[in-house]
Structures are given as C-alpha cells and as structure tokens.
Image (cartoon, rainbow, N blue to C red):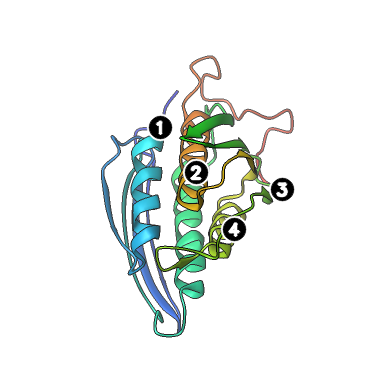
Amino acid sequence: MQPVTRRAEIARKTAETDITARLDLDGTGRAEIATGIGFLDHMLHALTRHALLDLTLHAKGDLHIDFHHTAEDCGIVLGQAIKAALGEKRGITRFGQCLMPMDEALAECAIDISGRPFLAWSVTFTRDKVGEMDTELFEEFFRALVMNAGLTCHITQKAGTNAHHIAEACFKAFARALRMAVEPDPRQAGAIPSTKGVLEG
C-alpha cells in the first residue's frame, strides 16, 4: 500500500555550503534546480525527469574555491531527502536496474534500497571537465548521495568516449533504476521487502 505522502524537506548549512531541498518521490518530473554549477543543474534536471520525482534544490557554495564542496553536499542533501521520503520503506519494490544508452555511451545502474550504503563506480572519463565541472566530481556526488540515502548502488560504464554522454547516461541510468526501486509493489501490501523485517544496516 502506497503511503499518502512520500515527501521530504532538508536544509543543510555549513561554512562551505547552504543547501535546501524539497522532494516528492511520487512526482511528475518537475525540477527547480540552482546549484551554481551549470552542468550539475543539467544532470539533476535529467535525473528528476527520468526518475519522475519533483525536486526543488537550491545551493549556495564556495564556488570561488572549486566545485567539490557544492557537488558533494548536493549529493548529501539529495540522499538525505530520499531516505526521509522513503520512511520505513514499506511496500516498495526495493530493487531497480537500468541499462541506459546515450549515443555512443552506455551506462548501467543497479540499486538496492538496502539500508547498507555502498557505491561501486566503474566509469572512466576521457577528459577532466564537462563544461566547468570536474569529471571526478560525479563519483563524489553519487557517493555522497548513496551513503546518505542508504543505497547499495553499482554504476558501470559499458561504452562511450564523449564525457558529456557518459555522465548523462550515468545520471539517467540512476534515475530509472531509482524510479523502479522506490515504486510501490502492490503484491507487498505495505510490507517491508526484507526477510529481516527491516531495511536498515
């Protein structure tokens, strides 16, 4: 049985960043994103659209230093919002996977909403930046997200040479896998999908 609402609001302020997020897991793909990092905004719009979330995320960070703190902390906040919106995780499908093509690039994502956070990242970029964003920060973003959401997540590049396409395939694959995993399973009838009876640790 699907909960009446699966929404969350998170605010996180440090000496490096000030971030607020509102998330609805049962949305229609509406996004209002402003991180100060153009390519990250583009990827979060894609994630929101293809996961069918509604997401508002605003971030102010120390971009005059570099983009690391803002990218990582956006992942932290989005992960916290996903975890809060899922609550006890009753009735969810729990597992999701997607093989996502993006022109010559191909990325695979598999997710288990396990409560045991782990990121396996097997992605290689052909250049150091996409736009102004360091490509090494995509791994940092996803690690922060899955650690705070409590997801086991494998993201694997199967093909690709264009850094923009590789990144976009990863974000879209994650989005579709997440959409599948959080989807209510009518056969679960509100049960927690675990033989342990809990999806924590």
CB of mark 3 within 8 Å of CB of mark 4? no
| Mark 2 neighbour density, 10 Å: few (under 14) some (14–19) many (20 or more) | few
CB of mark 1 within 8 Å of CB of mark 3? no
Percent across and percent down for residue 45 are 33, 48
How far apart marks 3 and 4 lie (CA) works out to: 23 Å
Check disc 4 and report its element: helix, strand or loop. helix
Whether residue 17 sits left or right of residue 115 in the image: it is left
Please tell me which of labels 2 and 1 falls first in the chain.
1
For mark 3, what is the residue? 201
Please tell me which of labels 1 and 3 falls first in the chain.
1
Check disc 3 and report its element: helix, strand or loop. loop
Check disc 1 and report its element: helix, strand or loop. loop
For mark 4, what is the residue? 139
> Residue 133 sits in which quadrant?
bottom left
Whether residue 46 sits left or right of residue 159 in the image: it is left
Q: Amino acid at mark 3?
A: Gly
How far apart marks 1 and 3 lie (CA) works out to: 23 Å
For mark 2, what is the residue? 87
How far apart marks 4 and 2 lie (CA) works out to: 26 Å
Q: Amino acid at mark 4?
A: Glu
Between circles 3 and 4, the one closer to the viewer is 4
Query: In this view of the protein, which residue sits in the foreground, 55 or 64?
Result: 64
CB of mark 2 within 8 Å of CB of mark 3? no
CB of mark 2 within 8 Å of CB of mark 1? yes
Q: Residue furthest top?
A: 187
Residue at 59 percent of width and 55 percent of height: 125
For mark 1, what is the residue? 3
